[in-house]
Amino acid sequence: MIQVQDIEFAYRSGGFRLRIASLRISAGEKVAITGPSGSGKTTLLNLLAGVLVPEAGTIVIDGVGVSQLPHEDRQDFRILRMGLVFQEFELLEYLTVLDNVLLPYRVSPVLIMDEIVRERAEDSVRDVGLGRKVKRFPGQLSQGEKQRVAVCRALVTQPSLVLCDEPTGNLDTSNRDHILQLLLEYSDSSGAPLVVITHDTELLHCFDRVLDSASWESETES
Amino acid sequence: MNNVLYMAWRYLRFHWGKSVTLVASISLILAIPAGLQVVVEQGGEMLTARAASTPLLIGAKGSAVDLTLSALYFRPPRLERIPYFEVSSFNEKGVNSVIPLHLRFSVGRHRFVGTTVDYFEFRGLTLAEGRGIARLGECVLGSRVAAALGVGVGGYVLSSSGSAFDVAGSFPLKMPVVGILAPHGTADDDAVFGDVKTAWIIEGLAHGHRDITQVNPDDGGVLRREEDNVVANSSVLSYVEITDENIDSFHFHGDPASFPIDAAIVVPRDLKEGILLRGRYQESDRQVQLLVPSEIIDELLATMFSIRDYVVLASGGVGLAALATAILVFVLSIRLRRREIETIRRIGGARQRLNAILAAEILLVLVAGTLFAVCSTLLLNRSAGVLIRLVAG
């Protein structure tokens, strides 16, 4: 469960300030965040992920005050408990499909890669229809295939929270539906809350709740 | 495989072109000065060893370096020649031995060394097959000459004539090969050895032909007959091969004491006699010099070492510039990978792990470059002798 209380955040370079009085997302809840550009959607996602730290207020995830954790602990919490999906896929060009999926285990000492993890990664790649492309590099994949790999990477650690920043923004309708299906299925089966930023109004009916960032208190400072 | 090393390896392997270039650059930075050191040191040792085993050299006055290189390594002689008389006069002075060296001719691209059997004993040369020179016209091949020409005992080699325009009588001599020397790793491996008199025959100072006193005037060949002299024309040909049948017809025209040689190795009985001899030749106003080869080679090496120092210094500068470029490549590469680094950071990758991966990439390149440099230096160390002989001829 996610609880956000009285958070306030401003970038050091200035120009933008976000205030959210209260936000609560329950276990297994699927939440879409929509709203105009520059209204703080991605900032909120980064605050939830612990990439950014609020100046004031608290963010509690599964009983852990993420915003109060030291930097290293926040990193460890993120890689252990969260799965992140980005609009631009952000796959590493020099790693194969399977190595990209296993990336969290390669870049953090808190995750231990064993045979079970490896099998889980291979299974997930097979499940998204890329079983014959495990040794391919991202440059050899289509856009939809890349995002499927990115979803597998986000879910391979079996996270208790999934955060997605416009995961279907660069995909055609067929791939968009496929990716969303994967995320929703995972949320259903694991009980992990799913938070998705999207501009695609056709997808909003798939979510339990839609948050409009326009309703938040955000301001652009001059 | 360790995750850090695995990630570094995958990156380097994917960008193999960049990685190979960096490894090659680092390899060259390290290998050039090290290789130069090896070549100069081994070259120096080879030069010194042969010079040290040659007590004194005698030759025409002029460049001491030319005389030394010519007498020790059979480089084409550039100095004037000295008469054989200089060798025989030494024998009167009671030295241990004086070994003449006639170096004007060659067999193909291999120097023909006209000398005496003393040379083989002096250099400690042993035969791999066959026997030593016993008769005029015979020759013994150095091991590399035999391999290069593909000639064995029982075969023949042909001496080169002095010059294409030498109409005075210097003509190729067909010489039977009677022995092949065992490899010794010196200039002797690349030479063809024969008697000094054989060299004079090639030079046209001695020759053999049919007995013109027995020729019927009606058969041609004889221009005129005088009381104690017979004048023949050019139809009386010299023999181009010395055989059992014609060896007795070979004769010298002139006094062999005045025939030329290029140098001679002088082996004094002891150090004192050597010093006395040198003193005598320094005072002499003859057109002959007596020198100690090791002193000449030491001077030559001193020049080589100072040149090497400059080259090492220069390659050090080039190395630093290349290293700076390599560092720049790494820094730019990290800048170009900012997005990738940001992604790893955003998914929760540990900063220390990320730094370790980047450091491992650099380390792998450095280790591979160093390994290649060490291997190539070791290889050069093993083959420097052959390389030096090839380059130095």
Image (cartoon, rainbow, N blue to C red):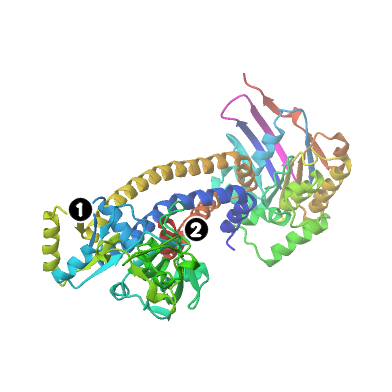
Q: Toward the viewer: B96 or A27?
A: B96
Residue at (89, 44) in percent of width and height: A174
Chain containing the residue with disc 2: B
- First of labels 1, 2 by sequence position: 1
Give the mark count.
Answer: 2
- On the image, the x and y values in percent for residue A154 come to 72, 50
Q: In this picture, is B175 found above or below B366?
A: below
Residue B106: mark in rendering: none
Which span of residues is magenta-colored? Answer: A11-27
Task: State the residue position of label 1.
Answer: B287
Q: Seen in the image, is A122 located left or right of residue B65?
A: right
Q: Toward the viewer: B17 or B103?
A: B103
Q: In this picture, is B133 found above or below B321?
A: below
Which amino acid is tagged 1?
Gln
Q: Seen in the image, is B48 located left or right of residue A50?
A: left
Which amino acid is tagged 2?
Phe
* Secondary-structure class at tag 2: helix
Q: CA distance from mark 1 to mark 2?
A: 54 Å
Residue that lies at the very extreme toward the bottom in this rendered image: B130
* Neighbourhood count class around disc 2 (C-alpha, 10 Å): few under 14, some 14–19, many 20 upward: some
* Neighbourhood count class around disc 1 (C-alpha, 10 Å): few under 14, some 14–19, many 20 upward: few
Look at discs 1 and 2 and give the one toward the viewer: 1
Residue that lies at the very extreme toward the top in this rendered image: A222
Q: Is residue B378 visible?
A: no
Could you say which quadrant of the image residue B197 lies in? bottom left
Please identify the quadrant where the C terminus of chain B is shown: bottom left
Task: State the residue position of label 2.
Answer: B372
